[in-house]
Image (cartoon, rainbow, N blue to C red):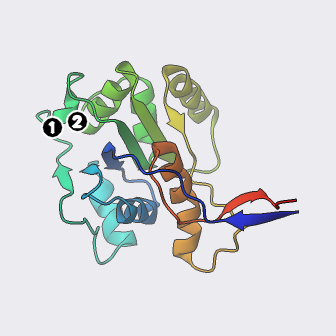
Amino acid sequence: MARFSAFAPHCVPVRLLVAITGASGSLYAQRLLDQLDPAVHEVHVMLSQYAPQVLATELPEGLRLRDGVHQHSHRSMNVPFASGSNPPDAMVVIPCSMGTLGRIAHGLSSDSLLRCADVMLKERRKLLLVPRETPISLVHVKNFELLLQAGAQILPANPSYYTRPKTVQDVADTVVGRVLDHLGVAHNLVARWQDEPE
């Protein structure tokens, strides 16, 4: 028999870059940013070229950024993380389009978002990609393989349902909770599965 637990890991401040692409799934990015307190973590945000169009469709009220969050243009190579001398602790691309994923896999640093991801790989820092695509082609699988071999983590946006989510936000939170776990950021978004005590 098992039960749910609200246990959350210890909170360690992180310097984090959140990149948002034009893939569907803007709610994942919003819910992640909602959980990141700029008073605790140094939070930076970067949007890809097509992200604003998708955000406007999926988040009609716009992307909400908390006071203290730093936003950067993907068009400028002057962003601090474009150099290996100044990488963040972690970078998460959420949602991650397959186009962005493929360009990262092949080192095509044609804008600052891609360059920052390239820096994370070469500096052996944590790069977490959250693709939202189905079905998956062999090209995608090969790109996954390259990225995993290079040290990236791939966390597909596959919601879970054993906690019986009641709203679309609850469903999104099952993914965001796993992202936060892999970033080492404490949260209580989703109850945790554990053994019933004897």
Q: Viewed as shown, does residue 96 lie left or right of 119?
A: right
Decide if residue 120 is in sight here. yes
Percent position (x, y) of residue 180? 48, 52
Can you tell which of label 2 and label 1 is closer to the viewer?
A: 1
Report the residue at 15% width, 37% height from top. Answer: 79
Q: Which residue is mark 1?
A: 79
Instruction: Choose top left, top right, bottom left or bottom right for residue 183.
Output: top left
Circles 2 and 1, Cβ within 8 Å, touching? The answer is yes
Q: Amino acid at mark 1?
A: Val
Using the image as rendered, state which of residue 182 and residue 25 is in the foreground. 182
Query: Residue 195, labelled with which disc?
Result: none
Report the residue at 24% width, 66% height from top. Answer: 66
Query: What element does badge 1 sit on?
Result: loop
Q: Quadrant of the N terminus?
A: bottom right
Decide if residue 132 is in sight here. no
Query: What element does badge 2 sit on?
Result: helix
Mark found first going from the N terminus, 2 or 1: 1
Q: Quadrant of the C terminus?
A: bottom right
Q: Amino acid at mark 2?
A: Ser
Q: Which residue is mark 2?
A: 112
Report the residue at 41% width, 59% height from top. Answer: 32
Instruction: Choose top left, top right, bottom left or bottom right for residue 166.
Output: bottom right
